Amino acid sequence: MIEWNEQQQMIQKMVRDFVAKEVVPNLDDIEYNGVPPYDILRKMIKTFGMDVMATQNYEKQIAREKAAAENGEDAPTKKKDGPSEGAGDQAAMTMIPIIELSRHAQGLVTAMGVSMGLTGGAIMSKGTIEQKERWALPLLTLEKVGAWAISEPNSGSDAFGQMKTLAKRDGNGGYIINGSKTWITNGPYADTIVLICKLDEEGVEPKDRKIVSFILDAGMEGLEQSKPFKKMGIGSSPTGELFFSDLKVGADRLLGGSETSYGRSGAKATFMQERAGVAAMALGMVERALELSTAYARDRAQFGRPIGDNQLIQLKLAKMEVARANLQNMVFRYIEMTAAGKQMSLAEASAMKLYAAQTAMEVSTEAVQVHGGYGYMRESRVEQLMRDAKILQIYAGTDEMQIIAIARDL
């Protein structure tokens, strides 16, 4: 794949027009004034039929799993290798909205991705049929907002080693949960929460405790959701804390129906889903930074000529174009691999995430520099790109953790 095909270009234009009409006029409200982004996202989902596609895919998967259960077979799983009809087109159609939204409000992608992709995806991947029917579809269509809760104040990169939130068996088949989670995307507004915590067992060292997961609903007694944090960037993605105080849950909320269904490996697999999306986010941000910087270099005159005539400015723009081309090739490679039914290695996925995050930060910083004093002003919009880019080097695994993952896999 070397370029978007005609159909993909048409979808790209439609999404770009929607963003210009529905997102850009409301940018200050969702980024700086605390207006939740979900109504805009729901409108986009309905406008492009994403809710219909999600419902159809959901119904097909449930039907397959029920048929397998009736025949006494294991639930069917997707093949790891081999082409899958329409998989490439589906991957492209997923990437295009991510790219277009990130040109103006990367936080919208984060809010939507965590709700539909991480939370809904975790339930669809590891949940029982009953759990999928009870919780999944409203998350997959964004009718309800989802949060995926793993980070704690002392357990960022060392998510499992320093985890303090505990679930203790209550002796009646249920569990009692105590602890807290922080930096939780959608946390303040989540209707459904997938909580990852440790099992409190007598005689088991903290480092050896099982990782277990539960599906929670907002309003449960013992669950408190904080107000949104004030952050450096991605204001359109609400982030907050969750507190658990003697929260009682039944075994029906244990994700997958057992204490081993969604442990360390399940959580790590969910992390992997984020990394290709980061490349698409970075591509949208770099595209926009390059557009704004090129226009400014052409129009801004100093010492009697456009600043774009200066070789130092030309060097900055040239490097931005190299970065844009590299990121686009990474996105196209991901789409091609998906179409071929192949998966990236851990090293390649981590390398893609590392490069994308660092590149977005470098390009957006240079875009501010090209704009000079104006670039430091909010109205230039390049300062927002710079602030938004920083989170790409932190969430879904910091740059430092990506380096460790690449080296270990190599």
Image (spheres, rainbow, N blue to C red):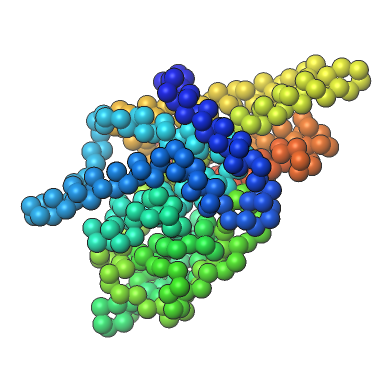
Q: Is residue 312 left or right of residue 403?
A: right
Residue 284 in the image: state x and y as whole percent.
Answer: 57, 33
Q: Is residue 311 left or right of residue 173?
A: right
Quadrant showing the C terminus: top left
Q: Is residue 353 above or below residue 155?
A: above
The residue located at (61%, 35%) in the rendering is 20
Q: Is residue 170 left or right of residue 35?
A: left
Q: Can residue 234 be seen by looking at this rendering? A: yes
Q: Can residue 389 be seen by looking at this rendering? A: no
Residue 144 in the image: state x and y as whole percent.
Answer: 43, 58
Q: Is residue 316 above or below residue 126?
A: above
The residue located at (56%, 32%) in the rendering is 16
Q: Is residue 168 left or right of residue 218?
A: left
Quadrant showing the N terminus: top left
Residue 184 in the image: state x and y as whole percent.
Answer: 52, 60
Residue 380 in the image: state x and y as whole percent.
Answer: 75, 37
User: Which image quarter: residue 248?
Assistant: bottom left
User: Which image quarter: residue 183?
Assistant: bottom right
The residue located at (60%, 42%) in the rendering is 23
* Nearest to the observer: residue 187 or residue 246: 187
User: Which image quarter: residue 148?
Assistant: bottom left
Q: Residue furthest right?
A: 303
